[in-house]
Amino acid sequence: MTAPAKTMVIDADAHVVETAATWEYMDPADAKYRPQPVEVPGETRLQYWLIDGKVRGFRFPAYSKEQLEGLSRLAGRTMTTPQEASEMTNVALRLQHMDEIGVDVQVLHNTIFIEQVTDNPAAEVAIYRAWNRWLADIWRQGQGRLRWSCVVPLLSMPDALAEMRFGKEHGACAVLMRPVEGSRQMIDPYFYPVYEEASRLDLAIAVHIANGSPWLTDFFRHPVFQAQAFDRFRVPTVTAVHDLLMSEIPLIFPTLRFGFIEASAQWIPWVVNEARKRFKQQGREWPENIARDYRIYVTCENSDDLPFILKYWGEDNLLIGTDYGHTDPSSDVDAIKTFQARTDISPEVKRKILYDNPAALYRL
């Protein structure tokens, strides 16, 4: 009897962690815009980036290995990764660790751009261009196993479109969008050139939890640290899904695919119910399968009630990721193994979430 074929596994949400070496890919003429590391000493070292004269860039606390192991025990999930692998100073080690955690391909997203890093178009172009060249080099070393979402300087649309074309030629499979960019939501017609070019290049739009509105991120800063991230980053991502469902975008860009990354999926029934009511009120026909017909994919987590979610979203538009390299509530290096051991969903649905669906979203 022939053994069943192993399901190829795509980690739909993995990360690179930027270091000073990232900015070595910056054009020498743009050296004045090079982000500089800033560190606040303490029991846990806090790290930031100084960009264009302001502390703007986002970095995770510099936990020691012992602290990460302690956090993992408290959270009940693994968050420890080799530093050289997370920071991509050793791509071979990253590939080796992927083998250990049962992942064949990772789609890499940034860490620093979860917030706006500058309101200066020239600085944004320089920084984003350097980041994309860094990822292109990682892809070159990755033996086809490391794909990525390119970042685009939306303060300069011609440069944004140029970066999309560069990304497509160098292993990118998606374009990063934040739910909010400055004073614009992602459904604003200002971004239609990005959607048109993404459609032409067959690139997905990856809406990773983030917030590109300095005013809104500052508004949600308050003393409860963990709640800040929920307010600032996750909530805008969820509302962006509802906005997209209600918008004309899925209809006027009929091949464009959207992936909403790292916001879990437990909110899907609520958003679907809210959108369905508004469709009815507007006299619009509700699609047979809104996720499939509108080409909207969402990453789930092992804490989600998947049998319940599947009733609302179907089985063809869910993905899963490890959030590799991070230490927030979504991070779980062993997420794939935990998911494979679940008994509440069928092997067929597991295969779709682990491979078929991310392969369709990212065209892998």
Image (cartoon, rainbow, N blue to C red):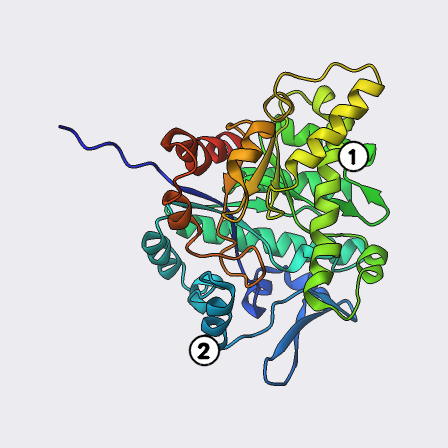
Judge left or right: residue 316 versus residue 58.
left
**Residue depicted at 57% across the width and 34% down the height:** 309
The N terminus - image quarter: top left
Q: Please state which amino acid type lies under the numbered disc 1.
A: Ile
- Disc assigned to residue 66: 2
Quadrant of the rendered image containing residue 97: bottom left
Q: Please state which amino acid type lies under the numbered disc 2.
A: Glu
**Residue depicted at 73% across the width and 62% down the height:** 228
Between 352 and 27, which is closer to the camera in this rendering? 352
Judge left or right: residue 90 versus residue 153.
left
| Helix, strand or loop under label 1 | loop
Picture coordinates of residue 118, whole percent (x, y): 78, 59
Residue at which label 1 appears: 187
The C terminus - image quarter: top left
Mark with earlier residue (1, 2)? 2
Picture coordinates of residue 294, whole percent (x, y): 65, 24
* Residue 51 to residue 242: above or below: below
Cα–Cα span, label 1 and label 2 = 43 Å
**Residue depicted at 33% across the width and 36% down the height:** 7
Determine crowd level at label 2: few under 14, some 14-19, many 20+ residues with C-alpha closer than 10 A. Answer: few
Picture coordinates of residue 358, whole percent (x, y): 49, 35
